[in-house]
């Protein structure tokens, strides 16, 4: 499906200068400086570039619309079409810079009216300007295969072969030009508006724990507190507020599922997830093999682990709020920002000095926004912005061990995005399935470093347990999310789903994936409401499991023969979106189409659980 421009993921903070925020026990937490994009929302450069975008997009349409077929048949077609694609790419970079800045500014405080207005206004301007570009990929796809192949023999166009081939894959699903224009223009008041409603609603919610109103990130963090009473109180607070807002979230889910069904029907996608598979450049049968392998492994992984964890707590079953609880009788501490930084950079450096050097730029140049603030977007992300600038990382750092792993995860994304940037605005972006590889690999490097330094049995058990839980959250939980989405979108085709029905579907997939050792207490049925991927990126979630299993397989290769591995790994990241997953994995002797590939990745998790079982009674 043609998209004239992609407003880059997510968003945050008011630029101007680099800042730090004092946080008790954590040290100075950095607040990013967005001046490398623009100096502020009122900066004259923003207005200048918006005006330039209007002019450039209209001029591009005037120059090329209705003429690509003629150009393709003329002498020097490759050079002329190459010049057109290069010009298109430059416009994409300009629009991406504007969209990234608006998005990042907004993410820093989604409840601030000035930022919200700025974000909405810029999105509308970008949508209107890029409407003039929609024709380009549509016309490019109408050029006869032979003519385009001959034109790509010229290096000017041949350089863009990976992007052109990806664009051609969408040809069967593209619509008549005017319909594409309508879909594009209505996205602002359609899906985009519902996404924004979700973000602003979630950011404004407060959850009362022990009489204190907390934002969602602070409340979710308490679910990992050493105090069981705090975990329970946080869970009850989440359930209460989610229930009070259930009608809104049910409406958002129903509307977006219907919106997707309309789009899929018009485009001719057979399966509800086919559009995601296409954008991920992954075959449906590969995803199905992954999903089937993970679901078959539930008893050997999540069911087995949670039964073991319940035993450690002296129970047969754990209430859901204890699922991610730290282990009993194991001292926990808050990890300061400086220590977290050193831990991750040291782990990266032991694998590849170049990888550590790139990651260090994020700290030195203030590309990270770390504090948890009221109104700030929840979760964490690495935003690639555009190749002419650099990525930014958003965290909600609160000193938990998992926060250190989140830092390692997002910096993995950041390193990947920096390495891929030279491919340009059209070919730097990586499909989601591959985008998660670098992030999960960064986590694995950090975990292995810390584990190797830990000799105390109790501490080692705690670290292994935390890693297994992260892997379960990345693999098992995300495949359960995928199952939830499949059921919701399938049933939505028969009419609206009530909030009770959505709750019922959620509970069924959670019970299946978590197993009998986790007791899903009343209130948990509403916890689907806060998962942003269901809203922003339907069916995104399996990419996490794909990436985790891929990394497990890659790491096994690294442990067996690490000579030259780092160079091959960084070359894989530097390929960006120019290669299919099969091409990227081939140098490592791996093939995602082989069922054994997924079993190998899942086997890593099983072996960690076996090691945990072997530690029982040794301390």
Image (cartoon, rainbow, N blue to C red):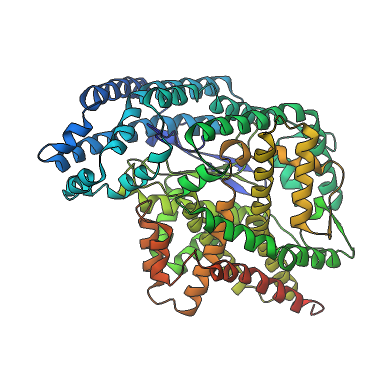
Please identify the quadrant where the N terminus is shown: top left
Image coordinates for residue 422, horizontal then vertical, percent: 30, 49
Q: Which residue is drawn at 24% across and 34% down?
A: 87
Q: Which residue lies furthest to the right in this view?
A: 315
Q: Residue at x 45, y 79 (%)?
A: 561
Residue 225 seen by the camera: no
Tell me if 416 is positioned left or right of 487 in this view: left
Image coordinates for residue 277, horizontal then vertical, percent: 50, 48
Foreground residue among 567 and 166: 166
Tell me if 50 is positioned left or right of 475 in this view: left
Tell me if 615 is positioned left or right of 441 in this view: right
Q: Which residue is drawn at 73% across and 73% down?
A: 612
Number of marks present in the image shown: 0
Asked where in the image residue 466 lies, by quadrant, the reply is bottom right
Image coordinates for residue 114, horizontal then vertical, percent: 54, 20
* 597, above or below 578, in the image: below
Tell me if 161 is positioned left or right of 193 in this view: left
Asked where in the image residue 23 lies, by quadrant, the reply is top right
Q: Which residue is drawn at 53% across and 57% down?
A: 285
Residue 2 seen by the camera: yes
Image coordinates for residue 191, horizontal then vertical, percent: 55, 28
* 259, above or below 336, in the image: above
Please identify the quadrant where the C terminus is shown: bottom right
Foreground residue among 128 and 74: 74
Q: Which residue lies furthest to the left in this view?
A: 75
Foreground residue among 75 and 44: 75
């Amino acid at each position: 499906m043609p998209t004239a421009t992609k407003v880059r993921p997510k968003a945050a903070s008011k630029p101007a200068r680099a800042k730090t925020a004092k946080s008790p026990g954590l040290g100075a937490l950095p607040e990013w400086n967005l001046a490398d994009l623009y100096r502020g929302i009122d900066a004259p450069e923003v207005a200048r570039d918006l005006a330039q975008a209007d002019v450039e997009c209209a001029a591009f349409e005037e120059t090329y619309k209705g003429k690509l077929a003629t150009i393709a048949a003329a002498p020097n077609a490759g050079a002329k079409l190459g010049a057109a694609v290069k010009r298109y790419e430059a416009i994409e970079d300009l629009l991406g810079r504007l969209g990234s800045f608006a998005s990042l500014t907004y993410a820093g405080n989604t409840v601030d009216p000035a930022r919200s207005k700025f974000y909405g206004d810029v999105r509308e301007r970008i949508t209107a300007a890029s409407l003039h570009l929609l024709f380009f990929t549509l016309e490019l796809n109408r050029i006869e295969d032979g003519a385009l192949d001959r034109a790509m023999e010229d290096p000017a166009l041949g350089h863009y072969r990976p992007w052109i081939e990806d664009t051609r894959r969408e040809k069967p699903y593209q619509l008549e030009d005017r319909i594409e224009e309508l879909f594009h223009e209505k996205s602002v008041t359609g899906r985009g508006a519902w996404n924004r409603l979700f973000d602003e609603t979630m950011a404004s919610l407060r959850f009362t724990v022990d009489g204190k109103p907390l934002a969602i990130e602070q409340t979710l963090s308490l679910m990992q507190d050493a105090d069981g009473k705090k975990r329970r109180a946080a869970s009850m607070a989440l359930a209460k507020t989610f229930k009070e807002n259930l009608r809104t979230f049910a409406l958002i889910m129903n509307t977006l599922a219907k919106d997707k069904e309309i789009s899929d029907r018009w485009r001719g996608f057979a399966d509800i997830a086919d559009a995601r598979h296409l954008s991920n450049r992954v075959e449906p049968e590969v995803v199905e093999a992954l999903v089937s392998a993970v679901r078959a492994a539930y008893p050997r992984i999540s069911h087995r682990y949670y039964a073991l964890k319940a035993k450690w707590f002296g129970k047969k079953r754990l209430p859901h709020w204890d699922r991610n609880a730290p282990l009993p009788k194991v001292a926990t501490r808050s990890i300061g920002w400086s220590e977290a930084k050193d831990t991750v950079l040291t782990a990266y450096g032991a694998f590849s000095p170049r990888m550590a050097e790139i990651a260090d730029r994020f700290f030195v140049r203030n590309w990270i926004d770390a504090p948890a603030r009221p109104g700030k977007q929840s979760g964490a992300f690495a935003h690639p912005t555009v190749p002419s600038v650099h990525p930014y990382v958003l965290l909600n750092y609160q000193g938990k061990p998992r926060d250190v792993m989140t830092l390692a995860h997002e910096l993995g994304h950041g390193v990947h995005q920096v390495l891929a940037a030279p491919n340009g605005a059209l070919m730097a972006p990586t499909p989601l399935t591959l985008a998660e590889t670098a992030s999960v690999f960064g986590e694995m490097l950090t975990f292995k470093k810390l584990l190797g330094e830990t000799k105390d049995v109790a501490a080692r058990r705690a670290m292994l347990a935390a890693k297994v839980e992260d892997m379960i959250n990345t693999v098992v939980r995300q495949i359960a999310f995928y199952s939830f989405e499949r059921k919701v979108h399938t049933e939505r085709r028969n009419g609206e789903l009530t909030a009770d029905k959505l709750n019922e579907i959620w509970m069924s997939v959670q019970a299946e994936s978590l197993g009998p050792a986790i007791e899903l207490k009343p209130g948990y049925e509403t916890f689907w409401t806060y998962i942003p991927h269901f809203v922003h990126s339907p069916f995104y979630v399996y990419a996490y499991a794909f990436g985790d299993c891929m990394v497990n397989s890659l790491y096994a290769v690294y442990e067996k023969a690490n000579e030259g591995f780092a160079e091959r790994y960084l070359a894989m990241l530097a390929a960006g979106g120019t290669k299919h997953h099969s091409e990227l994995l081939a140098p490592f002797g791996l093939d995602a189409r082989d069922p054994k590939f997924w079993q190998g990745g899942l086997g890593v998790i099983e072996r960690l659980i076996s090691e945990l079982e072997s530690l029982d009674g040794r301390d």
